[in-house]
Image (spheres, rainbow, N blue to C red):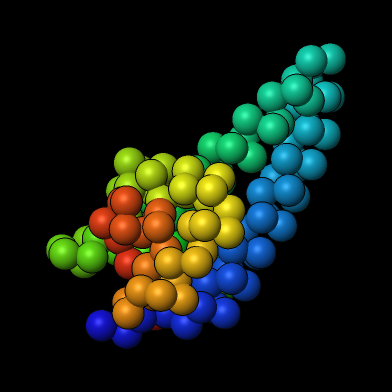
Amino acid sequence: MDVADIWKRVLAYLVDMLSAIILVLILGIVFSKITLNGANLAPLFFFIYYFFKDAMANGQSIGKRILKIKVVNVNTKNYCTLSQSFIRNVCHLLSIFDWVFIFIDKDKRRLGDKAANTIVLNC
């Protein structure tokens, strides 16, 4: 297995957060033109993207696509599913405790990867 480098993963995460913020800003502007309360819906899209981004085509969020890494099921090597993406990304809420596992696990899997039975590989 060609496990993705930790720094590629961190950079992909930062690209994803920037992408999500841009999405919220664009949708906020668009929705505010449609209805007065429409801009309040924009943050919902942030959370949808945040939790389900790894279930996008080929197990790649925008950041992962740019950095040529992907999320797959550790056993089957099938691309990350919606439920796996949600499980692995909800663990980000544990912050540093989630990422500590990357440094102690031989396959560089964080807590979210272990919980979702996923691994991040180079493409």
Direction top: furthest residue: 36
Q: Which image quadrant: the N terminus?
A: bottom left
* Side of 66 relative to 80 (left or right): right
* Side of 5 relative to 121 (left or right): right
Q: Residue 8's x, y, as percent?
A: 54, 78
> Does the rendering let one see residue 107?
yes
Residue depicted at 49% across the width and 57% down the height: 98
> Does the rendering let one see residue 59?
no
Residue depicted at 77% across the width and 42% down the height: 26
* Side of 67 relative to 11 (left or right): left
Q: Residue 103's x, y, as percent?
A: 46, 76
User: Which one is in front, 111 or 81?
Assistant: 111
Q: Quadrant of residue 71?
A: bottom left
Q: Quadrant of residue 105?
A: bottom left
* Side of 26 relative to 81 (left or right): right
Q: Residue 97's x, y, as percent?
A: 52, 57
Query: Number of numbered discs present?
Result: 0
Q: Which image quadrant: the C terminus?
A: bottom left
Q: Residue 54's x, y, as percent?
A: 43, 54
Residue depicted at 70% across the width and 45% down the height: 23
Residue 31 position (above or below residue 7): above
Residue depicted at 41% across the width and 75% down the height: 104
